[in-house]
Amino acid sequence: MALDSKIPQGPIADKWTNYKNHIDLVNPANKRNIDVIVVGTGLAGGSAAATLAELGYNVKAFCFQDSPRRAHSIAAQGGINAAKNYQGDGDSTYRLFYDTVKGGDYRSREANVYRLAEVSANIIDQCVAQGVPFAREYGGLLDNRSFGGVLVSRTFYAAGQTGQQLLLGAYSAMNRQIGRGKIKMYNRHEMLDVVKVGGKARGIITRNLITGEIERHSAHAVILGTGGYGNVFFLSTNAMGSNVTAAWKAHKRGAYFANPCYTQIHPTCIPVSGDHQSKLTLMSESLRNDGRIWVPKHMKDVEAIRNRTLMPKDLAEADRDYYLERRYPAFGNLVPRDVASRAAKERCDAGFGVNATGEAVFLDFASAIQRYGKETAHVKGLDENDAALVKTLGQEVIKNKYGNLFQMYEKIVDQDPYNTPMMIYPAVHYTMGGIWVDYNLMTTVPGLYCIGEANFSDHGANRLGASALMQGLADGYFVLPYTIGDYLSDDIRTGTIPTDSKEFEDAENEVRKTLNFFVTNEGKHSVDYFHKKLGKIMWNKVGMARNVKGLTEAISEIKELRAEFWKDVKVPGTNEEYNEELAKAGRVADFLELGELFAKDALDREESCGGHFREDAVELDGEQKGEAKRDDENFAYVSAWEYKGEPSDAVLHKEQLEFKDIELKQRSYK
Ligand SMILES: Cc1cc2nc3c(=O)[nH]c(=O)nc-3n(C[C@H](O)[C@H](O)[C@H](O)COP(=O)(O)OP(=O)(O)OC[C@H]3O[C@@H](n4cnc5c(N)ncnc54)[C@H](O)[C@@H]3O)c2cc1C
């Protein structure tokens, strides 16, 4: 099937408005006869469900947690971008569009990104109206901070809990519709297949995670807002339950999977401490507003710090290497995540890592504490030369800005980050790849939509900080509610979709067969045994730096591991009860297929771009020596993979990317 991105004609700034002016609408009375399934109630799914119900559609919403408000979006810390230009520092729709395309290393679709920038301002208004308590400045206006890869301050935030507050907003909007009976909420339900009837998505099969009951649900359209697949690496900053199952089942039913290898490795996470770990903790990017990243310049100091004969705070300024400020003077500590992560890896690979494993760099707030302390003393007319006073005042400011993050760090690491620099290292965080969607956010299966982190749409090969929340809420509140109407306008006479058709029966039987296999297989190893092994292959061979040898090995090792899994997995308990191991088994089975496609995609893309770094595609000389080398001539496309059975048989379709409004050039943050 040829890919049609359905980008509207006309100048980029007019596309979305013209599009909205000309699409088909469904009148309010007819909306009452149309059912829509929304799988996922994070920021993307939650905002879509609330808005569609408010418009009048009958919505059925599903999540695997015990409440929509426990979706993984709740973990988001640092903030949400919007081109409001409240700071008067030169921000605009165009600049947000430009920063996002450049930040994504010119691998995203211009039209989608422009629309995202355009609706970003509406999101803030919507959320403020819902009562989201964004941080405010002294004068009462909403405050902003800076995130990586941009030269303006456009990030709105609610302390270090922005995702939680935004999700409470979406959740309360959903609850109003649940109260009205317009949303029927299915908590603790896991979608295990998409059902197609007559080539269109017409429903899903779910398992009630409490009772094990398998259910059929029908609708005129199905929307997936099921999050990212970073947990294919086993260790990541994602919630433990985050998984690819919904997207992967959709892929198996005909939805192309785009750019699976585009993964974001976040530079500021608490380093891995041992084999016992199943989760990594993010230290928000907002910390890079004030924290300076460094390692010692000299190996003797590295060793002394590791042996604890030298305290990092006692190392003289002249002996520190603020390597981001050194290498990227224009953006300094606020370079994009992919650049910062690779730079940390480069220093640690060179032996300068500051912890016992050699995989950590410092994030230091001492300068910021001084700066804020002096400023506060000045404002209050106190003695700016009183070192103890300045430190106390400065720490107070830092506490107000990042207190909960500092507290979290101290609880996990047992060190006081106000007095000694934090230790950080990159970790898997976000997946830019996902289900391919057109401008309407529809997948290659008619009637099946995909929104939020689960789709591939807006971030290219690297997502800028604070842009995931923006995209999820843009999709759910402001884009999908329009685009889906155009599709559903053909369904006003269809009537309720029956669930007793052969298509529903076949899909249900397949689900039952797999579940039955898991609970009866006489294997020896737990699900986690396989998941950990998969994670190790992914991190070592498909992680921050990739090469042909490693990727080829990864493909065959994952294939072998998958065969072993289906032979030897042991799932205790039954299907007719709450069985977390059973749910996990299905998710890991899908990760074992995705992992192989992921490596295959990385092998196919013989360039470095954004989070995808190929060791054989590096600038060899000039100002950019050592930086990632893109190949626009051969790889300026979206890779969209069609399922054909084994991941090795997947067929590649290319969506050629066109850059008419932004010049394609080398990404430089120097
Ligand atoms: C620690 C951390 C901090 C972050 N901080 C920021 C930040 O400051 N700013 C920013 O922009 N981004 C941030 N991000 C990224 C951002 O939080 C996510 O990309 C975004 O919240 C994803 O939202 P979503 O709605 O697409 O998916 P999610 O919030 O992951 O929701 C997925 C939903 O799908 C449901 N689901 C999944 N599979 C199934 C299934 N098979 N059946 C039924 N239901 C299913 C789940 O129950 C859940 O309701 C952060 C990410 C992490 C990990």
Image (cartoon, rainbow, N blue to C red):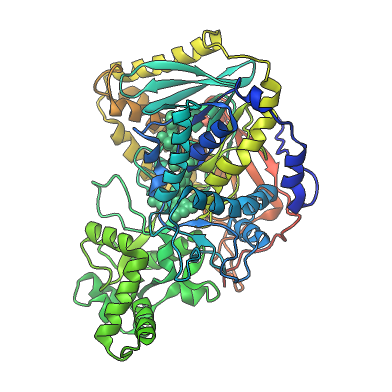
Quadrant of the rendered image containing residue 158? bottom left
Asked if 63 appears above or below 212 in the picture, the reply is: below
In the image, residue 109 sits, relative to residue 489, either above or below, namely below
Q: Tell me the quarter of the image containing the C terminus.
A: bottom right
Q: Along the horizontal axis of the image, is 483 left or right of 571?
A: right
Q: Is residue 437 visible?
A: no
Which residue occupies 55% across, 8% down?
501
Quarter of the image that includes the N terminus: top right
Vertical order, 556 against 184 (above or below): below
- Residue 358 position in % (x across, y down): 30, 63
Q: Nearer the viewer, residue 573 or 600?
A: 573
**Residue 474 locus on image (x, y percent):** 58, 46
Viewer-nearest residue: 513 or 85: 85
Figure label count = 0
Snapshot quadrant of residue 519: top left
Which residue sits furthest right?
A: 10
- Seen in the picture, residue 428 relative to 156 is either above or below; the reply is above
Name the quadrant where ligand 1 sits.
top left
| Image coordinates for residue 129, horizontal then vertical, percent | 51, 50
Percent across and percent down for residue 646 are: 51, 27
**In this picture, residue 387 sits left or right of residue 25:** left
Going by the image, does 439 lie left or right of 542? right
Q: Is residue 478 visible?
A: yes
